[in-house]
Amino acid sequence: MNFSKGDFKILSQSKKFYLKHPMMLCSLYDTKFLNSFLQKKMWPRSCECMFCGSRFHNYRLHGYISELAEKHKVSLGPRFSDCPYCGSVDKYRWLWFVLQNHTDLLKSYGGQKLLHFAPEGPIKERIKACFKGEYFSGDIMAGRADYVVDMTEICFENNFFDYIIACNVLEHIPQEKKAIAELKRVIKSGGIIILSFPVAFDMNTYEDASLSEEEKIKNFGQEDHVRIYGIDYVERFERYGFEVKNLLPSGLMSKREINKNGFKHVSPILLLKKL
Ligand SMILES: [Zn+2]
């Protein structure tokens, strides 16, 4: 059995958590070892990674306990979600599931345009390989994407894109209203903006960009987050004038399917259609 650096990080940050949930400790054992051992004992391999197709008994533990996750019912915190074979994480597999099953993005014809904000390696390559149109990636930091793009001042003309993907970006931006106005300006009528962000399901959205880094970690889960979205998140985006589709694994599939795909605590994905 092997321990990774991440496992020690999780363990050292979450002693209290493991005292409360001792069964979670089993995830610190190498899952491949358990898989090969337990396979012989006929424990069914009920998990199946949609990226690499591997079947196994459980996903590996990902994330660590935070004050925010302990206080609120939030889509963050430790969960069994990493594939032990390809290392894929739940948020990418969940996004892929939505793109495949709830948008036409992967069935698009040439000539369409997609802007992908803050693209992270594994999902960027997967989307680029399947999207038939023109792919643009953008990030506020130089060197992280094809274009340096500030979401509050997007350097593209009006009605330019058919699709925009911005996952885990908006919670970093103090001027949400300005960012949404810009997204609305550059997306075509009928175009789809795909958004996700952490949500606390027991409170309304709380934001304050003036908090200290320490306070931001406590209230928003990260030192560079300026808000935590709450249960009012759908109304919030409807007020910006979009037709909103709110997608959550619990609303789309059985518990068995959720466990099979490792979609335990993933954030909702919103599809905003410009009318
Ligand atoms: Zn995998």
Image (cartoon, grey):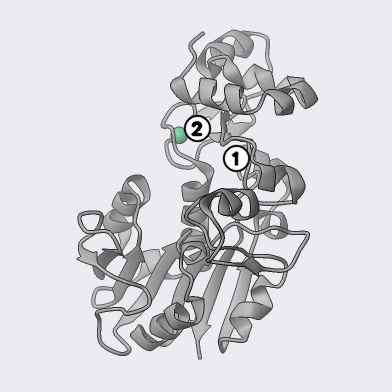
Q: Callout 2: helix, strand or loop?
A: loop
What percent of the width, then of the height, locates residue 195? 50, 67
Q: Is residue 24 above or below residue 80?
A: above
Residue marked by disc 2 = 83
The three-letter code of the residue at mark 2 reads Cys
Q: CA distance from mark 1 to mark 2?
A: 8 Å
What percent of the width, then of the height, locates residue 224? 47, 55
Q: Quadrant of residue 42?
A: top right
Residue at 71%, 73% in the rendered image: 232
Between residue 134 and residue 62, name the one nearer to us: 62
- Left or right of 88? Residue 256 is right
The answer to whether residue 257 is visible is no
The three-letter code of the residue at mark 1 reads Gly
Q: Callout 1: helix, strand or loop?
A: loop
Between residue 189 and residue 216, name the one nearer to us: 216
Between residue 254 and residue 275, name the one nearer to us: 275
The answer to whether residue 32 is visible is yes
What percent of the width, then of the height, locates residue 182? 39, 83
Residue at 55%, 18% in the rendered image: 31
Residue at 34%, 56% in the rendered image: 119
- Left or right of 187? Residue 143 is left
Q: Quadrant of residue 202?
A: bottom right
Residue marked by disc 1 = 262
Number of numbered discs? 2
Residue at 44%, 27% in the rendered image: 85
Q: Is residue 10 above or below residue 172?
A: above
Do the residues bearing badges 1 and 2 touch, measured as CB atoms within 8 Å?
yes
> Does the beta carbon of the residue at mark 2 sit less than 8 Å from ligand 1?
yes
| Image quadrant, ligand 1 | top left
- Left or right of 129? Residue 105 is right
Between residue 179 and residue 42, name the one nearer to us: 179
